[in-house]
Image (cartoon, helix red, strand yellow):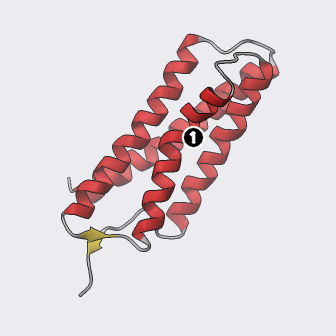
Amino acid sequence: MTLNDLHGILFNAHILFSLALGIWSASMAATNRSISGQFWGAVATSAILAGAVLLVGIIMFVQGLRVERTTIYFLYMVWLMVIMPGLFSMLRGRDDRHAALAFAMLAIFNVFVSISMWQRGLVGPWVPAAG
C-alpha cells in the first residue's frame, strides 16, 4: 500500500465519520437529548482523523509529491482539523439541543467540503512535482 492509498483511505474514513457524526448529532437535536461524553470523544476522534490525513499529506509533500493547488489542500485540511473542536470552544461546552443542531450542521458541511475537495482534485493523486 502506498501513501497515496493510505491518504485516500483515511480521507474517505473522515468523510464517513463526519457523516455519522452529523446524523448522530441531528438525532440528538431531534429528540431533544443533551450531548453525551461519547459524542465529545467522537468530536475529538474526528479532529484526530483529520490530523492523520494532514500528516500523511505533509509526509508526501516532504517527499516531493504534490496535488493540484497544494496550498489550498493544506488550508482545507487545517480547517477540517480545527473546526469541530473550535465549535466546542465557541459554544463553551454547551450540550443542549441547539448545540447538537450546530454540530449536526457543521459535520454535514464538513462532508460537503470534503466531497468538494475530492471533486476538484485537491485530495489526489499525489504526483511528483513538475520541473
Where does residue 2 sit, x and y in percent of width and height? Answer: 21, 56
Residue at 60% across, 27% down: 89
Q: Is residue 37 above or below residue 55?
A: above
Q: Quadrant of residue 68?
A: bottom left
Q: Left of 124 or right of it: where is 93?
A: right
Give the image location of residue 4, x and y in percent: 28, 59
Give residue 10's position: percent from left, percent from top: 38, 45
Q: Identify the image quadrant of the C terminus.
A: bottom left
User: Which amino acid does the dot numbered 1 rest on?
Assistant: Ile
Residue 80 in picture, x, y percent from top left: 52, 46
What residue sits 47% from the left and 27% below the top?
A: 44
Q: Residues within 10 Å of mark 1 (few under 14, many from 20)?
A: some
Relative to 66, is 18 above or below? above
Looking at the image, which is closer to me, 57 or 83? 83
Q: Is residue 77 left or right of residue 57?
A: right
Reading the image, the residue beneath label 1 is 83
The quadrant holding residue 92 is top right
Q: How many marks?
A: 1
The quarter of the displayed image where residue 49 is located: top left
**Left or right: 32 as drawn, with respect to 71:** right
Does 94 sit left or right of 6 as displayed?
right
Secondary structure under tag 1 reads helix
Please tell me which residue is depicted at 56% across the width and 38% down the height of the picture: 18
**Residue occupying the point 57% across, 19% down:** 39
Depicted 52 relative to depicted 73: above or below: above
